[in-house]
Amino acid sequence: MLDKKLLKAKIELMTRSVFLSTINLSVKHIITDMVATAGTDCRQIMYNPDFCKNLTIIELTGLMAHECWHIAFMHKPRQGTRNHVLWNKAADYVINNMLLDSGYTLPPGGLADKAYIDMSTEQVYDELLANNESQEEYELLDLLDTEGNAEEATEEIKNILVKAVTQSKIAGKAAGEIPDSILRDIDELINPRLPWHTLLNKFISTTVKINYSWARRNRRYKSVYLPSLHSYGLSSLTFAIDTSGSVTSEELRTMLSEIRGIQNTFHPKHMKIIDCDAEIHNIYDINYTTDILSLEFSGGGGTSFEPVMEYVKENPTQALIYFTDLHANVPIDPKIPVLWICTSDAEKMPFGKTVYFN
């Protein structure tokens, strides 16, 4: 019986959204008691028979679209180290607001609040965290752990999204039904950017005067007199690392390794690393004896850029490099070169240069 209802819901979704129906037809659909209502691990969508049997076809279509949006937004891979329950609630607010605004009918009891309209999942999460929203239980929990290799699953999702966006563009529907953030991500998959670390080095090279000089022997070549790379005027460099929960330990280690490489290449006279989220937790003065990879970082709260901007205003630096998900209010421009290394799909900052980590 439920199989027939699911088939009718799939057909209904096909009449409403080329993008979502392409995703929907690209994953498995399973009827199981393993979920309380419905859920997805981004490879399949699961439906509880007792919950779904009393839903109308229109409500079941809304539920199906809801799970497809979890896949489209890559909510599970984006969760990072955030609390699972709170992240699921934030994702549901974002999706349900979108669906209701698009005229879908959802099953009773779903989370929706106009206060969160036009906010990203990360921003809603920070709001819920600030408002002490319960992190213990959520009966509509539908973001499920991915079985098997998580990286392979993420690549599968990307391939599905490329196909879904392509089909939607062919049908002339992309502009109206797909968020700009997803279109931008798919464009990056098809036309990838330069590696972020390449852009990081280019940023520093153009910020300071770099030159090859014969004034000092390159120590690598004792018997051959070759020029050495020098930076003229690179007096100070400040790195701010947002540890609000969106940055994985692997990303953090990669960034710290890159900072160490910058130190060895450009030889700034003074270099600082700021550990921050909504406030500054630690400020590390870096020298050549510092074991950068062993630095300890706190955080885990929301994100605010203002504390760091106030710090660089009071403690002038030649350039600021901010490693963050960009999910916070736009700060005041500090009027110095700023490079934003973004770990999410957020919009570019209105000042400085924004590059994307992934």
Image: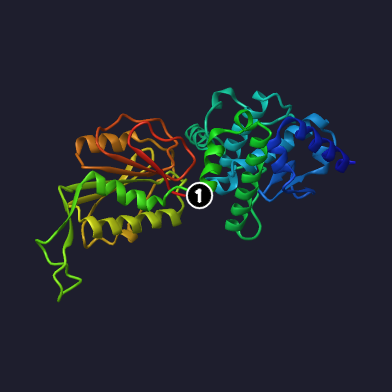
Residue 48 shown left or right of residue 307 in the figure? right
> Is 14 located above or below residue 236 in the figure?
above
Residue 226 shown left or right of residue 83 in the figure? left
> Is 250 located above or below residue 109 in the figure?
below
Residue nearest the viewer, comparing 123 with 184:
184
The percent coordinates of residue 22 (x first, y second) are 71, 41
The percent coordinates of residue 293 (x first, y second) are 34, 60
Residue visible at 46% across and 52% down?
248
The percent coordinates of residue 268 (x first, y second) are 19, 52
Residue nearest the viewer, comparing 131 with 352:
352
Q: Residue furthest left?
A: 215
Q: So how many labels did they put on this image?
A: 1
Residue visible at 79% across and 29% down?
58
Q: Residue furthest bottom?
A: 223
Q: Which residue is mark 1?
A: 81
Look at the image and tell me whether residue 283 can be seen.
Answer: no
The answer to which quarter of the image holds residue 97 is: top right
Residue nearest the viewer, comparing 71 with 226:
226
Q: Residue furthest front?
A: 170
Look at the image and tell me whether residue 198 can be seen.
Answer: yes
The percent coordinates of residue 144 (x first, y second) are 66, 49
Residue 4 shown left or right of residue 343 in the figure? right
Q: Secondary structure at mark 1?
A: loop
Quarter of the figure that contains the N terminus:
top right
